[in-house]
Image (cartoon, helix red, strand yellow):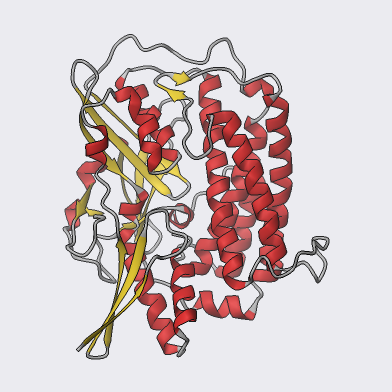
Amino acid sequence: MTQTKTIDPVRWQDLPARVAILNSSGTPRVFYQVTVPLKISAMCEGRPVEEIPRILTILSPAHHLVSAKALDRLFDVTPPPLAINMREALLQTQFLTGHFKKLYFLLTAFENPFTDSASPRRGTSQYTFSHMAKDIMRHLALAQEAAIILGGRHEHPLTSLPGGVSGYLKNNSYERLEEIAGILVQFVANLADFFRKNFWTSPKALKDFSEISLKPMAGVSLDIRNSKNPQEDELVVTDSSGKESRRFPVEKALDNIDLAKESWSYLPFAFFRDKGWQGVQLGADSLFFTGPLARMNHKKAMDTEKAEEERCNMVESLGPFPHFSVWAAFWALIIETIQSAEKMTRLCVREKLTGPFTRQIPKNIGSEGFAALESPHGIIYHHYQVDSKGLVKNIRILDTSMQNNALRCLMAQKAYEVSMADKESWEKTKNRIEVSLLPF
């Protein structure tokens, strides 16, 4: 007889999802299931292609930026430096807001943020997980304010257009952005120090996270070969041992990566086309993942000084890359928050965000446009085909939810097995599974 347990909904996921646990003859199988269909082609085909950057923010704010990059190629225009800097600064605010949310959810999974209304000074013994969680939310609000200044709205930005951005910033925005960047770069240093001293040394946290680690899996990340010419960008595959196994141009993404459907999931599973679909199973060499930890496993140094120092701290504590544990995945989030805050201090200055013009006006339209972007959750790839009037004939999207779908299934399976081995209650089991899925 088959017994079924469900976690519905799974907290903290971008798309509505549940975890179904089927126990037949004492052998549990765990399924991570996105519970809503998402027909992107139905939303986009037949529409003017210029509308796509605003439409696809329904997936995430980062889709606004990668869509604009794809339109730059479709219309064969190069944005001016001002527009490139504004887009990049907006992307860094998205990294900060996305990672802050996950770290907030992590802390609140261990301690209720509303148990103590007092606000002791940081660094004192009374400064707890809940107090840091409140600090994260305060600085999350600042990052969202910066996103509104740069993108018009923080969840559904609307400023990026083919060839650039829609306009200049207001005069008082430059000083405010610089002020926000300074506050954030100080906070993320304190955030990293707090996790290093309080969280990574917590016996409970260490026990929970050290037990949940997948078998090695390939990762895919984006290598920006020339920041002034996105056409030279390449996707890099890092194998399960941490060595670069191959790379291919962004335009060949869908020649190398395919999508498989399973009857029990609305969301397809990404896999390497040349390996063939082997199902969602541990050890399948056709599977891969993307995101912060995959970027770390590429073993490249971080782009900023303090972020690289924190990456070295991680290596000193956990050993050399690659890593595949929940512990390492959360640490990767902290490293990237430091890098994004440092990048904001470089970008959010008047001379970077001013210039003679904001946009190169397109004069011609091609038939095909594509682009890839490293979003907070991982690689996003857009590919458009249009007719002579600029109406979308075909659209193909490679989203992070598809690329990490198999990873989430395997991670949920591992977390459940660990919880059962420790004879945890159902409430603790649910919390363990949700926390294990959170950083991916």
Residue 220 vertical placement versus 133 (above, below) = above
Residue 207 occupies which quadrant of the picture?
Answer: bottom right
Q: Residue at x 74, y 35 (%)?
A: 179
Q: Quadrant of residue 162?
A: top left
Q: Position of residue 99 (x, y in %)?
A: 55, 52
Q: Is residue 57 visible?
A: yes
Horizontal and vertical percent position of residue 349: 68, 27
Q: Is residue 323 found left or right of 114 in the rendered image?
A: left
Count up the numbered dots.
Answer: 0
Q: Nearer the viewer, residue 88 or 145?
A: 145
Image quarter hosting the N terminus: bottom left
Residue under the point 39% across and 65% down: 9
Q: Nearer the viewer, residue 403 or 236?
A: 403
The answer to whether residue 64 is above or below residue 77 is below
Give residue 6's quadrant in the image: bottom left
Residue 325, visible in the rendered structure: no
Rendered view: 363 above or below 58: above
Q: Along the horizontal axis of the image, is 242 left or right of 91?
A: left
Position of residue 161 measured from the top left corner of the image (x, y, whole percent) = 42, 22
The residue drawn where x is 56% and y is 54% is 101
User: Residue sitting at 59 percent across and 43 percent down?
Assistant: 340
Picture coordinates of residue 89 (x, y %)? 57, 33
Q: Quarter holding the C terminus?
A: bottom left
